[in-house]
Amino acid sequence: MYEAETASNRSLRDRLAGLRLFRPLYRDGIVGTVRWIFLEPLLLKVLSPRWANPMRNGYVIRYIRATLLGGLHRRAQAGLFPRRRAVEGYTIRAPLDMADGRFEPFLTMLIRKLLAGHATFVDCGAYVGYYTALASALGHHVIAIEPNPDNAQILLRNIIDNGWTNTRVEIVALGAEPAIMPLSNSGIYASLVDGWAGVAKRSLLVPQRRLDDIALTSCNDGAHTLIKIDVEGSEFAVLSGSEKLLEQEPAPCWLVEVIQGGLAPNVSEAEWEAVFKKFFSAGYRAWALVTEPNRLLEVTAAELATARYSSDLGGVSMFLFARCDACVAALAPEFG
């Protein structure tokens, strides 16, 4: 008589079938396979639901493996990303897509093009230094700002590995006023906003400074400055600490990640609009980086909250702000 397959057998069969996907994470054969079979249910059922995201499972397991083998947290964190040769020619310790050219291709192309007309690059929320490495390798003066000390360790290793002397690193958070702030410490999602991206609260205290106090001296020498802001929900606070930079001439060109409604339940739609109003009041124009196809879509103050922009910008999170028409004119005709 035919016997139906039990749920436990089906689960084990499916798990074994998926081992090929995770083979790159485990180069120690049978031991690694056993770890995956027994660790996977633990990660998905016992730990916080945020680890159920398949985009992060690989790094969680690598972290646990590194911890088991390496012992200490810092040693594990330092070995989380192997040193890889990037397509641009330098080496970088970062996720694989940051080395092989698959990471944010439109934004990467745009930054590379904008850097040609700017002497200084300020990377706010540098993470492990993907965009910092891009600008440093091209010979620009770079200020990399990263509050997470674990990310900063990898960022510093990337700078040392390549021997760059044109890059300054500030291990601080950015905000409206100098302070000491709790940071939810979780890799690329490290944030001052509680609950950002579903990250459970695991805080450490970090110093907070104003962007004016860090970058104004370097950016006030008459050279054009490109500023990238990716600070996981603290965009308006960073701009509130950048009043002098917003008013200076020549005006910096800004690339800001700002998400409609944010990624935390306590972030409102009004905060998304407040970032745009801050730039508009300083005389800036705004463009959304729309993909598929790649194009720049201008966002005006009059139509910011209209249905047109609500639909067109539904999946857009990165915006270009410029007060100098030459900055945007240099991008044509690719991004017309």
Image: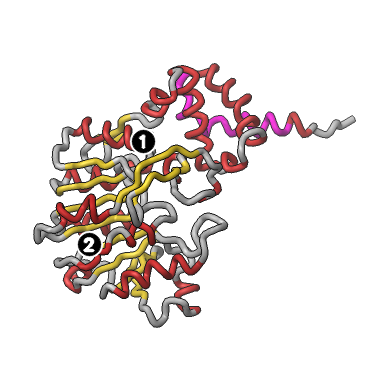
Q: Which residue is mark 2?
A: 245
- Using the image, determine if residue 325 lies above or below residue 100: below
Observer-nearest of 323 and 81: 323
Query: Looking at the figure, which quarter contains the N terminus?
Result: top right
Within-10-Å neighbours for mark 1: few <14, some 14–19, many 20+ = some
Question: Residue 233: percent from the left, percent from the top?
Answer: 44, 55
Residue 106 x/y as whole percent: 33, 57
| Labelled pair 1, 2 in contact (Cβ < 8 Å) | no
Lateral position of residue 73 relative to residue 211, left or right:
right
Residue 327 lies, with reference to residue 157, above or below; the image says below
Along the line of sight, which residue is nearer the eye, 316 or 176?
A: 176
Q: Which residue is mark 1?
A: 149
Q: Is residue 29 left or right of residue 162?
A: right
Residue 47 in magenta stretch = no
Q: Residue 52 appears at what percent x and percent y?
A: 59, 41
> Range of the magenta residues?
10-28
Which amino acid, mark 2?
A: Leu
- From this viewpoint, is residue 100 visible? no
Q: Quadrant of residue 46?
A: top right
Would residue 213 be seen by someone viewing this image from the given angle? Answer: yes
